[in-house]
């Protein structure tokens, strides 16, 4: 990142590398911001993130990523009032080789349409089974699915639980990601994510 430390993130626009295969094995640091940076998911109180029901929903859908994409592993994450940080790992490469962190499941489908799985308290109209799990998807595909499912669940909350309305879309159209290339970088970014709430007042995403 141009000689900047991995914990310095002044510009969270996409820095996706031209020609890079985001379906290959690797670790990726992801940041997604709410549209207009509106605070929707709770508040930071004395350095601790206190999630509201919408924030809890976001956290649940992040864990659901592993069910939809079995060759993805969800590592450290934090839901903040108006954005979301996480580390996602691809454990399957282009030759369908899977690392020891997951099992090769029969019924692999690549490029299936995006479908959700109902989470308790946040019903969805469509479910998926083993035949609808997706392998070899790019990180962009997985994040797109996450944004779609959380948006659908949030709309449900607006209609049934009077959650705060958003302007046209829940998330900003784009997202920021960084390819994690070594263990030291992974450790630094994991600490950055864990410390996000206590550093909230200095976060450049606090306001517009």
Image: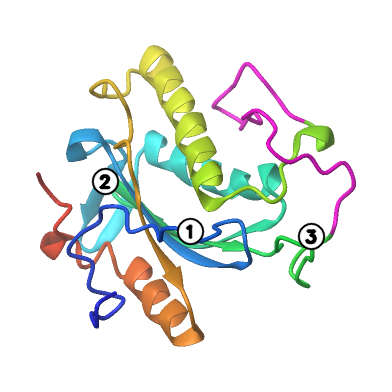
In which quadrant is the N terminus drawn? bottom left
- Give the alpha-carbon distance from disc 2 to disc 3, as whole Å: 38 Å
**Is residue 181 or residue 203 the one in the foreground?**
181
Classified by dominant secondary structure, the portion drawn in magenta counts as loop
State the residue lying farthest toward the right. 106
Percent position of residue 150, x then y? 46, 33
Asked if 148 appears above or below 7 in the picture, the reply is above
Give yes or no for residue 120 being in the magenta stretch: yes
Quadrant containing the C terminus is top left
Tell which residue pokes out farthest to the front in this image.
19
Span highlighted in magenta in the image: 104-128
Front: mark 3 or 1 = 1
- Above or below, 204 against 146 in this view is below
- Which residue matches tag 2? 81
Q: Which of the 4 image quarters holds residue 40?
A: top left
> Disc 3 marks which residue?
96
Q: Is residue 29 above or below residue 105?
A: below
Q: Which mark is residue 11?
A: none
Q: Report helix, strand or loop for mark 2.
A: loop
Q: Is residue 48 above or below residue 68?
A: below
Residue 108 drawn at (x, y percent): 82, 44
Question: Is 109 on the left-hand or right-hand side of 93?
Answer: right
Residue 113 pos. (x, y %): 65, 28
**If you read the primary sequence from the N terminus, does the residue marked by circle 3 or circle 1 appear first?**
1
The residue at the point 65 percent across, 50 percent down is 66
Marks 1 and 2, how far apart in space? 34 Å
């Amino acid at each position: 990142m141009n000689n900047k430390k991995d914990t310095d993130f002044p510009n969270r626009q996409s820095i996706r590398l031209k020609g890079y295969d985001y379906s290959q094995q690797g670790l990726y640091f992801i940041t997604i911001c709410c549209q207009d940076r509106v605070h929707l998911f709770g508040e930071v109180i004395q350095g601790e993130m206190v999630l509201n029901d919408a924030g809890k929903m976001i956290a649940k859908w992040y864990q659901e990523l592993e069910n939809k994409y079995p060759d993805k592993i969800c590592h450290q994450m934090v839901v903040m009032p108006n954005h979301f940080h996480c580390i996602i790992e691809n454990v399957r490469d282009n030759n369908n080789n899977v690392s020891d962190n997951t099992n090769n499941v029969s019924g692999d489908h690549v490029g299936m349409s995006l479908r959700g799985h109902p989470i308790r308290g946040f019903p969805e109209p469509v479910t998926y089974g083993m035949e609808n799990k997706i392998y070899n998807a790019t990180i962009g595909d997985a994040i797109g699915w996450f944004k779609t499912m959380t948006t659908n669940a949030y709309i449900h909350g607006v209609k049934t639980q009077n959650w705060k309305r958003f302007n046209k879309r829940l998330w900003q159209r784009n997202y920021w990601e960084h390819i994690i290339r070594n263990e030291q970088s992974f450790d630094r970014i994991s600490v950055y994510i864990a410390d996000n709430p206590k550093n909230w007042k200095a976060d450049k995403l606090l306001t517009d």
